[in-house]
Amino acid sequence: MEVVLVSKLVYLFLSNTVLFYLLYIFIFRMIQLNINKYLKLGGALFGSLIITVGLSLCFSASHFLLFPENPFSVNQQITISLIKDLIKLIIVLLSTSQLYSINQRQLTLFENEKLLADNIRIRYEVLKNQVNPHFLFNSLNTLDGLIGIDNERAHEYVQNLSQVFRYTIGNKEIMHLDEELDFTESYALLMKIRYGDNLQIQYNIDDKYRNYYIIPVSLQLLVENAIKHNVVSSKHPLLITIETTPNDSIRVTNTIQPKSGVEHGEGIGLANLTERYELLFQKEVIITKTDIFSVEIPLNKQQLDHPIKNTK
């Protein structure tokens, strides 16, 4: 008696396993077909119903042949088996629907992240392409003025210029603050050669933030904007301050002495930088304008959880 009971349980387990396996395989393969979604849905429902009814009848007949001692008649056995298998079909359809929804959400998230990565990369390239030609033109003009007049300063200028361009052509999405400061200082030295003591840049950096992360070219952009939009002369020297804050950020401030005939505002570069921080770090760049112009950039203590690699 116990042997018969065990045999029935084994048969029940195997038949249920086969039914579930075939239903899941069929439905998932239907989902993968590149056809109209309504045809896909109708085919999955109709096909899974055919599979369920067909296997249910086969398993009922086999069960009756293997275990003839049964309190139910053949028709009753078939009906009970069919009802149970239809319930299993409903379970499979509901679970498959849930799994499909989860999969679609994951695909959507993946596509969004891919679009985000492409957006950040494109905007970064746009920013570099926007800065480099203008900066190169001014740099060559300055260098031309130094050659033959002050060759030592011209040599120093070329060295700093090479460091600046080596940094700007890099493909990293984020850099240590220490590296960004070195780059900004090289750029500032180029500007100091051009403007002399009329340009003053002060640094107040807490060493604990030097290994924090920042988006490349951020500080240089702010220094360049300050020089671009303000008068730099012996009568009106321009003071730019770069300092870290207790809010895990770095702030760039400059005195406001606007050039005449120059449109003022955030500009493409600063707006681009602001959006990149929102997309990459989900943090806000704070811009304030009182008697001074101030831009506060967030610093990240850790690298990105999912760093975005350049495809180049």
Image (tube, rainbow, N blue to C red):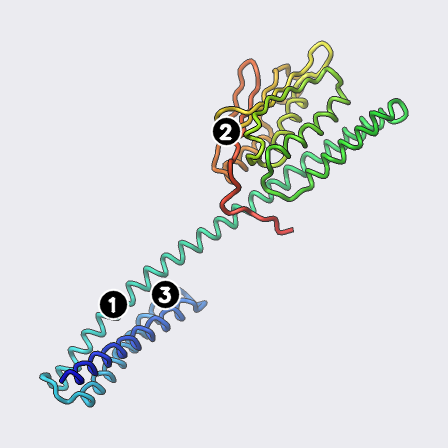
Q: Is residue 135 above or below residue 170?
A: above
Q: Secondary structure at mark 1?
A: helix
Q: Earlier in the sequence, mark 1 or mark 3?
A: 3
Name the residue type under label 3. Tyr
Q: Give the position of the N terminus as an image quadrant.
A: bottom left
The residue at 24%/81% (across/down) is 11
Check disc 1: other Cα within 10 Å, few if <14, some if 14-19, many if 20+.
few
Q: Secondary structure at mark 2?
A: loop
Q: Where does residue 290 sit, x and y in percent of width and height?
A: 53, 15
The residue at which mark 1 appears reads as 90
The residue at which mark 3 appears reads as 38
Q: Where does residue 97 sit, x and y in percent of width and height?
A: 32, 62
Q: Where does residue 57 sit, x and y in percent of width and height?
A: 23, 83
Name the residue type under label 2. Asp
Camera-side mark, 2 or 3 = 2
Q: Secondary structure at mark 3?
A: helix
* Any part of residue 260 in sight: no
Check disc 3: other Cα within 10 Å, few if <14, some if 14-19, many if 20+.
few
The residue at 22%/72% (across/down) is 86
Toward the viewer: 39 or 292? 292
User: What distance separates the C-alpha of mark 1 from that of mark 2?
Assistant: 54 Å
Toward the viewer: 163 or 29? 163
User: What distance separates the C-alpha of mark 1 from that of mark 3?
Assistant: 19 Å
The residue at 58%/23% (across/down) is 243
Marker disc for residue 248: 2
